[in-house]
Amino acid sequence: MATPANRPAKVPRRKAKKAEGVNILPQEVVDRLEHLATLPPDWDSYGAVPIKPEAIEKTKAMFKQILPLVRKDVPLPFIAPSPDGGVEWEWTVPSGKELLLDIPPDDRPVPFLLVELSDSAEEVETEGTLGDPLALEEAVKRLLSR
């Protein structure tokens, strides 16, 4: 997971623009992914490998897929480097729900953990893998439901 040193300063959320019907990523997402792409070997001083271009591209594609589902008042996920060359999402929304994704640097499915609160205020965890594109949309819809 990310360390405080890897966390960027909070940046006001910018709108995603559309060009020819295609979602363009918010600038803070582009900036963060460009930063992750420049991390050197051993960036965490524990032997981490550089972030693989495949993980960056998979992250961009996943963001483009979920942007139409995200309300403007919802903060975007924090994007962190993973020591295996992948990318992690840490997404907490105002309701207290949390979605964690570990996007691998290869073609493996994306593992996820969705944390929700039950009616009795107990944490309920759902974990699995996002093996198909609709699974990501369903996880995000559950995260963003009130």
Image (cartoon, rainbow, N blue to C red):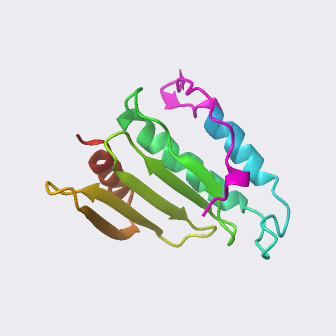
Q: Quadrant of residue 117?
A: bottom left
Looking at the picture, tell me which residue is in the foreground, 19 or 85.
85
Looking at the picture, tell me which residue is in the foreground, 97 or 120.
120
Compared to residue 9, the image places residue 104 above or below, namely below
The residue segment tinted magenta is 1-27
Compared to residue 38, the image places residue 17 above or below, namely above
Residue 38 coordinates in the image, percent (x, y) = 82, 52
Residue in the image at 76% along x and 53% along y: 37
Side of 134 relative to 100 (left or right): left
Give yes or no for residue 21 being in the magenta stretch.
yes
Compared to residue 115, the image places residue 28 above or below, namely above
Residue in the image at 82% along x and 70% along y: 45
Task: Name the main secondary structure of what is drawn in magenta.
Answer: loop
Side of 48 relative to 3 (left or right): right
* Quadrant in which the N terminus appears: bottom right
Give yes or no for residue 3 being in the magenta stretch.
yes
* Quadrant in which the C terminus appears: top left
In the current view of this chain or complex, which residue is farthest to the front?
121
Residue in the image at 31% along x and 42% along y: 95
How many numbered callouts?
A: 0
Residue in the image at 66% along x and 60% along y: 54
In the current view of this chain or complex, which residue is farthest to the bottom?
47
Residue 124 coordinates in the image, percent (x, y) = 25, 64
Residue 78 coordinates in the image, percent (x, y) = 56, 47
Q: Quadrant of residue 51?
A: bottom right
Q: Quadrant of residue 120?
A: bottom left
